[in-house]
Image (cartoon, rainbow, N blue to C red):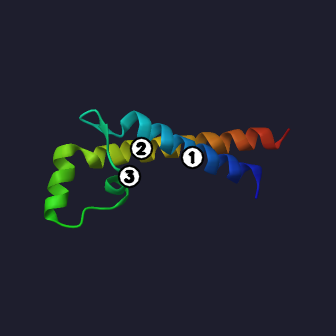
Amino acid sequence: MSKLVIYGIVLGFIGLVVGYIIFGRVGGEFVPLGNLINPPQDFLDEIREYVTGIGQIRQRILVSGAVGAGFGIILGAVTKNR
């Protein structure tokens, strides 16, 4: 596997973890990972996610992971030429 892909995957994962640590709290407690990974099953789950803000939390964590992956790809491209 190329250095570019490895850096992207590793830093993307680190971005997800850091994003969860920063944004994954509601009321001072971490949101269970199952609630973040699984989509709402019915209308009541959608209402619960809207009220608690889990959808926004999920989006912020995914953006953190994407930023980490993007930074990893850039870092891999820069270090590839060395």
Mark 3 element type = helix
The residue under the point 80% across, 44% down is: 80
Instruction: Point out the tag, 1 or 3, that comes first from the N-terminus.
Output: 1
Give residue 52's quadrant in the image. Answer: top left
Q: Which residue is mark 3?
A: 33
The amino acid type found where label 2 is placed reads Ile
Q: Which residue is mark 2?
A: 61
Mark 2 element type = helix
Gap between marks 3 and 2 measured at Cα: 11 Å
The amino acid type found where label 3 is placed reads Leu
Exactly how many numbered labels are in the figure?
Answer: 3
Q: Which residue is mark 1?
A: 12
46 vs 21, nearest the viewer: 21
The residue under the point 27% across, 47% down is: 54
Q: Position of residue 76 (x, y in %)?
A: 72, 43
Pointers 1 and 3 in contact (C-beta within 8 Å): no
The amino acid type found where label 1 is placed reads Gly
